[in-house]
Amino acid sequence: LDLEPGSRLFLYTDGLAEANNEQEEQFDTVRILQALNAHPDGSPRELLENVRGSVNRFTGDAMQYDDLTMLCLEYRGSSDI
């Protein structure tokens, strides 16, 4: 995997895509991509907060049965020391 400066990786567990709302619909990867693309230039923290907010609005008060783990990394480039 070759990363260019500014490249980002977004990693998540299946609990994110499988988060259910009160109608038992899943959040799914389409909604994850929509949440990530809503503010694509945000910092990794902002991307995580945006996805988490989208999941919270989607799930409402529905009980969740799995973890919602996410990690966003940004490669800033190597430094010549």
Image (cartoon, rainbow, N blue to C red):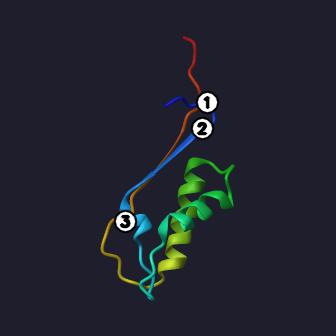
Q: Amino acid at mark 3?
A: Gly
Left-right relation of 16 to 67 = right
Element marked by disc 2: loop
Q: Is residue 40 above or below residue 68?
A: above
Distance, label 1 to label 2, CA atoms, is 5 Å
Q: Residue at x 45, y 75 (%)?
A: 26
* Labels 1 and 2 touching (C-beta < 8 A): yes
Number of residues whose C-alpha sits closer than 10 Å to that of mark 3, classed few (under 14), some (14–19) or many (20 or more)? some
Left-right relation of 68 to 32 = left
Q: From the image, tell me which residue sits under label 1.
A: 4
In what quadrant of the picture does the C terminus appear?
A: top right
Q: Residue at x 45, y 81 (%)?
A: 25
Mark 3 or mark 2, which is nearer the start of the sequence?
2
Distance, label 2 to label 3, CA atoms, is 25 Å
Distance, label 3 to label 1, CA atoms, is 29 Å
- Residue 20 percent across, percent down from the top left: 42, 78
Q: From the image, tell me which residue sits under label 3.
A: 15
Q: Is residue 43 above or below residue 67?
A: above
Which residue of the protein is positioned furthest toward the bottom in this rendering? Answer: 23
Classify residue 8 by image quadrant: top right
Q: From the image, tell me which residue sits under label 2.
A: 7
Q: Amino acid at mark 1?
A: Glu
Frontmost residue, 41 versus 33: 33
Which residue of the protein is positioned furthest toward the top in this rendering? Answer: 81
Q: Amino acid at mark 2?
A: Ser
Element marked by disc 1: loop
Number of residues whose C-alpha sits closer than 10 Å to that of mark 1, classed few (under 14), some (14–19) or many (20 or more)? few
